[in-house]
Amino acid sequence: MPKGLSITLRQSAPIPLAVELVVASGETLALVGASGAGKSTTLRAIAGLYQAPQGRIVCNGEIWFDHQQGINVPGRRRRVGVVFQSYALFPHKTALSNVSEAMLDQPRRAREAIALELLDRVHLGDFADRLPRELSGGQQQRVALARALARDPHVLLLDEPFSAVDHPTRRAMHSLLAEIRRSTKMPIIIVSHDVEDASRGADQICYMRDGVTVEQGPTRVLLDTPHTHLSRWLKSEL
Amino acid sequence: MMDWQALRLSLLLGVLTVVILAPIALVVGRWLATTRLRGRAAIEAALTLPLVLPPTVIGFYLLVGLGPESPVGHGWISMFGQPLVFSFEGVLFASVLVNLPFAVQPTQRAFEAIGQDLRDAAATCGHSLWRTIWRIELPLAWPGIVTGAVLVFAHTLGEFGVVLMVGGSIPGETRTLALSIYDRVQAFDNASAARMAALLMAISLIAVTASFVLGGRSRKRA
């Protein structure tokens, strides 16, 4: 059974999409491009929160979406961990409950023990009883990361994890992601409009423009080679 | 002299209207908050009509629509042997209809305030639609739902025109406290009217204050 994630998406409206992505197990892909390039839509399609009219999404050999076969596994049945740009923490639940919420199929004590373990892993064990509004933006993001890991996901998706956070928070997120990369074998996709942040630690980088995945390749190769679409876009951004 | 019978009837009408409207407001309000249907604006406008139309206009249409000559009124008579208009049931029906916007709008706004990202997060946590509603949406939307219920109750207590048009003013059947006040004034019994008006105002003030307190709590939480 092939391990990893492969995505093909096609649509003409409301925004055109022509996405071809492959992320091997244990690999991190930075999906970069300007705002409105279709990065977040691609992420939502992988998570089952958006359905493109045509395409195929396969994770570890399991078909999540195939328009030809009429397969579309709902988002709640896909083992996907998502860290939303807004963090999307449930405001009426404590940090511990937010993380536990992703494991309702397990007995209460077991899920609370795992949730506490995960909060410890993101260095928030002492903040388990706090409501989201009592946490800083960076702490909220780490709770969201712990929640995303709680379902033992097959894929981890992060939507703009480095935007709207200060430098120390960004550094903390980078080191957490590095630790997750070391300890898991799942594909990770980081969506960002900031190439420098997204590409740090990423094995692959994919540049999206106007809904199209223009090029994908090893991070250093694409960044260091002149005349790639990515290099040209970066130059134009300067 | 206080018209206790009218007070009891007003309270019963208020409570029953809330009980009937609460589930309707939940379903319609959430649906309006989440649907992408093109005709949504038209549906919202139709639901708002009772707020802007004169009560006599609504009362007139209800009188015609529920009267013995109408299919609804005729069906009611063949089922229960008595007309729907000028009965408590008819007034209750009218009250539910007139109060729809008071119940639906705060509920809709409460569900709208939750935001799609929380629903998406719930889906990625493995929640079904029902589980999302039960564990995420209802705990967040309840102040709006309760606000709607309180407004409906307070508005029902004060409703005059529609009740008079559909129910007349039959003691023990359709004469609510608001109608009783009007009757007392007509009979130059201002002292009784003042007592009942003060009571109605106190009940309404308590109800509306409760809705503001709940609204404030909701804003704090957000």
Image (tube, helix red, strand yellow):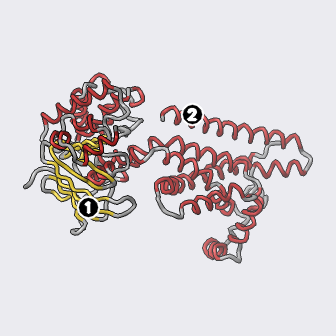
User: Residue at coordinates 60% horizontally, 53% vertically from top-left?
Assistant: B16
Query: Please, is residue A72 above or below residue B206 in the view?
Result: below
Asked where in the image residue B195 lies, by quadrant, the reply is top right
Quarter of the image that includes the N terminus of chain A: bottom left
Q: CA distance from mark 2 to mark 1?
A: 42 Å
* Whether residue A104 is visible: no
Q: Which residue is mark 1?
A: A72
Residue B187 versus residue A181: which sits nearer the camera? Answer: A181
User: Residue A153 is drawn in which quadrant?
Assistant: top left
The residue to which callout 2 is attached is B216
Secondary-structure class at tag 2: helix
Identify the residue at image location x=41%, y=35%: A92
Q: Looking at the image, which is closer to me, A65 or A28?
A: A28
Tell which subunit mark 1 falls on.
A
Using the image, determine if residue A127 lies above or below residue A111.
Answer: above
Query: Could you say which is closer to the camera, residue A55 or residue A20?
Result: A20
Is A112 left or right of B104, judged from the image as shown? left
The circle drawn on residue B4 is none
Identify the secondary structure beneath mark 1.
Answer: strand
Q: Mark 2 vs mark 1: same chain?
A: no
Residue at screen point 22% across, 48% down: A79
Question: Label 1 sits on what residue type?
Answer: Asn
**As drawn, is A186 to the left or to the right of B151?**
left
Q: Amino acid at mark 2?
A: Gly
Q: Looking at this rendering, what residue extends furthest in the top direction?
A: A126
